[in-house]
Image (spheres, rainbow, N blue to C red):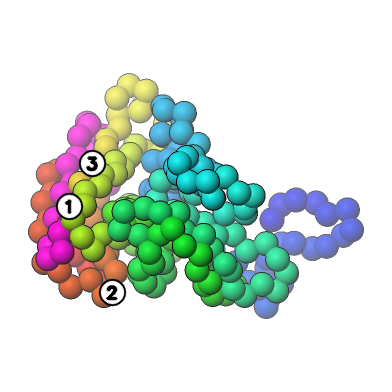
Amino acid sequence: MNSWKASGEVNTPWLHPSALGPIREAIRFHYRLLPYLYTLYRRAAQQGEPMLRPLFYEFEDDPRAYADTDDFLLGPSLLVANVVEPGQRERRVYLPPVAGGWFDFWSGTPHAGGQDIVVAAPLDAMPLFVPAGGMIPMTEPRDYTRLHDEPSRALRVFPAQTDGTSTFTLYEDDGLSLAYRKGEFAEVAFELSTTRDSIALSAAKTGRYALPYTRIRVVLPEREHRRIALDGNGVELTVGD
């Protein structure tokens, strides 16, 4: 948005009223993803993991993951199907084979892995997919007045439909100082276990940094109706809509 164009196009969003709505929502979505993004930054710094990953980074045994593509992974839990053609309103997307398949991030619709699917690509919702067992920490959608340091947390969980286990560790610090270098940080380790009849999710907080929240709301796909058991240690887990 802040780049200069030699041909003189004006690319500041507020000067294009017809596109301002989708751009505003995209910026808000970016801020809601900050807990996930901040964790990815930490992992990149500590472990050398790239945040943006070609498909073959996670699926090195899949020949199709090496094909030329505009798609990429944002961390381990989001497959981003870019829309790069003018006027394009649907996308053919290749979903690599994973146990339990994939979920549409927006609708929760499940898709089998190892296949191509055609999905809608409206201006206000880039196609995003999450592997079964994926967990994405976000902020709550209700408060847009504190975008950069919103203290609420909502964990988007996409549980496999069959037996499976997965983990994700959320990283937290004050986001401002260098106190983390002296140990002032915390981690919240999530463990997800599923069967055909039940879902179990636990969270355990470690580290001396005092979290700015006491609870994390767990958000499941709308069609999920299995029994759910939650176990929080150092932070409360609650199930929301």
**Residue 228 in view, yes or no:** no
**Residue 131 in view, yes or no:** yes
Does label 3 or label 2 sit earlier along the sequence?
3
Cα gap from disc 3 to disc 1, whole angstroms: 13 Å
Q: Which residues are magenta?
A: 194-212
Q: Secondary structure at mark 2?
A: loop
Which residue type carries mark 1? Ser
Residue placed most toward the observer, 47 or 145: 47
Residue 167 lies, in percent from the top left, at 26, 44
Residue placed most toward the observer, 5 or 210: 5
Which residue type carries mark 2? Glu
**Residue bearing mark 3:** 189
Task: Tell us which disc is closer to us: 3 or 2.
Answer: 2
Residue 73 among those drawn in magenta: no
**Residue bearing mark 1:** 193
Q: Is residue 110 left or right of residue 239?
A: right
**Residue bearing mark 2:** 222
Which residue type carries mark 3? Ala
Q: Residue at x 75, y 62 (%)?
A: 11
Cα gap from disc 3 to disc 2, whole angstroms: 24 Å
Cα gap from disc 2 to disc 1, whole angstroms: 19 Å
Does label 2 or label 1 sit earlier along the sequence?
1
Residue 134, numbered circle: none
Q: Are marks 3 and 2 in contact (CB under 8 Å)?
A: no
Q: Secondary structure at mark 1?
A: strand
Q: Residue at x 35, y 68 (%)?
A: 110
Instruction: Assign the N terminus to one quadrant of the image.
Output: bottom right
Quadrant housing residue 183 = top left
Q: Is residue 66 left or right of residue 204?
A: right
